Image: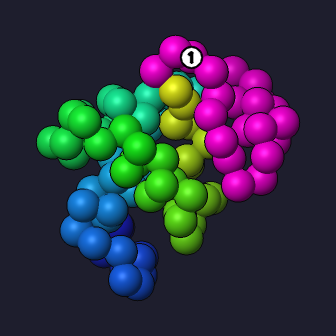
Amino acid sequence: MWEWLDFGPATRLQKAVYYATFRIPYGQTRSYRQIAEAVGRPGASRFVGNTMAKNPFPVLVPCHRVIRSNGSLGQFGGGVDLKRKMLEIEG
């Protein structure tokens, strides 16, 4: 299912971040740190955030479900208000 997506010039690590994000269940969130840990790079939270900012498939790779470790929303390409609304809809 995953292989048909063309992530273009994304590195292997970026693809791992996208896949870990893709696997976040509907209605749940993960922190940038948790995603970094999931891909074997526990100190790479900023890398995860930068990778999310380049997400070519935001409908399939739900980057709105990735938040800061302190529970705040962090950034989102569509704006923080939209991120908040999407998370509220998912409940």
Percent position (x, y) of residue 6? Answer: 41, 81
Q: Quadrant of residue 44?
A: top left
- Residue 59: image location, x then y, percent: 62, 58
Quarter placement of the N terminus: bottom left
**What residue lies at 70% left-to-right and 30% top-to-bottom?**
87
Q: Which residue is rendered at x = 33% and y = 46% of the image?
A: 20
Which of these two is toward me, 2 or 17? 17
Left or right: residue 24 versus residue 71 is left
Q: Which secondary structure, mark 1?
A: loop
- Which sits in the foreground, 25 or 83? 83
Q: Position of residue 57 (x, y in %)?
A: 56, 66
In front: 7, or 51? 51
Seen in the picture, residue 59 relative to 38 is either above or below; the reply is below
Residue interval drawn in magenta? 69-91
Q: Is residue 72 magenta?
A: yes
The residue most toward the top is 70
Dot 1 corresponds to which residue?
Answer: 71
Relative placement, left or right, of 87 versus 22 is right
- Dot 1 amino acid type: Gly
Residue 88 appears in the picture as rendered:
yes
| Whether residue 60 can be seen here | no
The residue that appears at 56% across and 58% down in the rendered structure is: 53
Q: How is the image coloured?
A: rainbow
